[in-house]
Image (tube, rainbow, N blue to C red):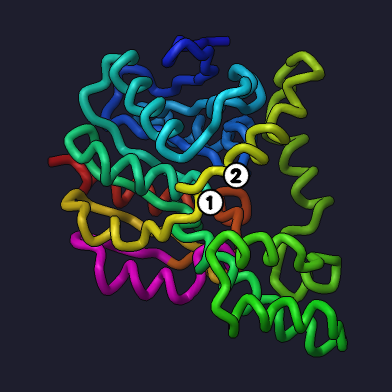
Amino acid sequence: MSYLSILGKSIYYEEYGIGKAPTLVYIHGGPGESCLTYTYQAQKLGETFHVISFDQYGVFRSDAVDNEPLDVRTLVNMLEQMRSSLGIERWIPLGHSIGGMFALVYAHTYQDSIDGVIYDCPMWSALHTAKAIAEATLPCLEENGRSDQIKLCNEILNTDLSPRKAFEKSLKIDMDETVQRYCHAIETSRYNDYINAYIPDPMVAEDCWGKYIAFTEKLFEAEDFYINYLPYLAEISKPQLLIVGEYDMTCGKYEQKWFEKNAPAGKSEVIADCAHLTWFEQPEKYTDIIKTMLSSFIV
């Protein structure tokens, strides 16, 4: 196992395709998921490119969060310190889900450190993600007469809630089997089969698995988690690629249209027949899109 000391914290990372170019840095979602589930894609992309994959501070094999506050800006600044410590001149952030927020803030803050940026089903705005989830689930809830849940979705969609309140309400939407099936979510058995087939046993201490709880709680307390980062897209001059699943509930139609209209040098790819886990649901298509686009990112 490889570790870096970043701002006094031990950060676990993996490296594939050493000596190749360009460098892709994978920023996992969750919040708190770890890079473990991305192992197969990191290996596949590492056949052609240099790939860095890591557990964010506070997650799994990296140091647990301490009593200090945790926010988006801290995680973004730690990513830049990682780049410097690894001696990489420029790289291409690839952020999945909440990792897409970190990728956007990083690309906006450190534009001289990137060749481009890739967003995979990103969360750029807590408010708009909450609305996208409510919009996607409401028809199913109406079909099944779930009056309490219908009221919850309508509050998110039709009342003037703060981003924090809207997001907190979206977490209360009941994603039972009926809703998951309606929204094309991955079946648990299929996901478990993938994990068993492609993800190696990390052989870690038992306490690694629960670190994400404190990480998530602190991140949800941070004020900058609830900022609408969509305007940042218009201020990034380097190439930007948006990958989104056809049925994704995190990056909704509003965000997709905003990107298409406002992101300079922005390109988007909608992957059919999948939802939020594009890299798992359509792995070959996912890899091909990234391989095709990376050749245009080098300046």
Which quarter of the rendering shows the C terminus?
Answer: top left
Determine whether, in the image, residue 236 is placed left or right of residue 13. Answer: left
Local packing at callout 1 (Cα closer than 10 Å; few below 14, some 14-19, many 20+) is many
Residue 2, percent across and down?
52, 10
Identify which residue, 108 or 122, lies in the foreground.
Answer: 108
Which mark is in front, 2 or 1? Answer: 2
Identify which residue, 45 or 178, lies in the foreground.
Answer: 178
Q: Residue furthest left?
A: 299
The reply to whether the magenta stretch includes residue 266 is yes
Question: In the image, what residue occupies the spot 33% across and 27% down?
Answer: 80
Establish if 74 lies above or below 194.
Answer: above
- Mark 1 highlights which residue? 97
Magenta stretch: give its range: 248-269
The quadrant in which residue 203 appears is top right
Residue 123, percent across and down?
50, 56
User: Does residue 148 appear anywhere in the picture?
Assistant: yes
Establish if 129 lies above or below 87.
Answer: below
- Mark 2 highlights which residue? 221
Question: In the image, what residue occupies the spot 51% across and 71% down?
Answer: 252
Local packing at callout 2 (Cα closer than 10 Å; few below 14, some 14-19, many 20+) is some
Question: In the image, what residue occupies the spot 56% across and 24% down?
Answer: 68
Which amino acid is tagged 1? Ser
Residue 43, percent across and down?
51, 30
User: Does residue 285 appear anywhere in the picture?
Assistant: no
Spatial CA span between label 2 and label 1: 18 Å
Question: In the image, what residue occupies the spot 63% across and 76% down?
Answer: 156
Residue 194, percent across and down?
72, 43
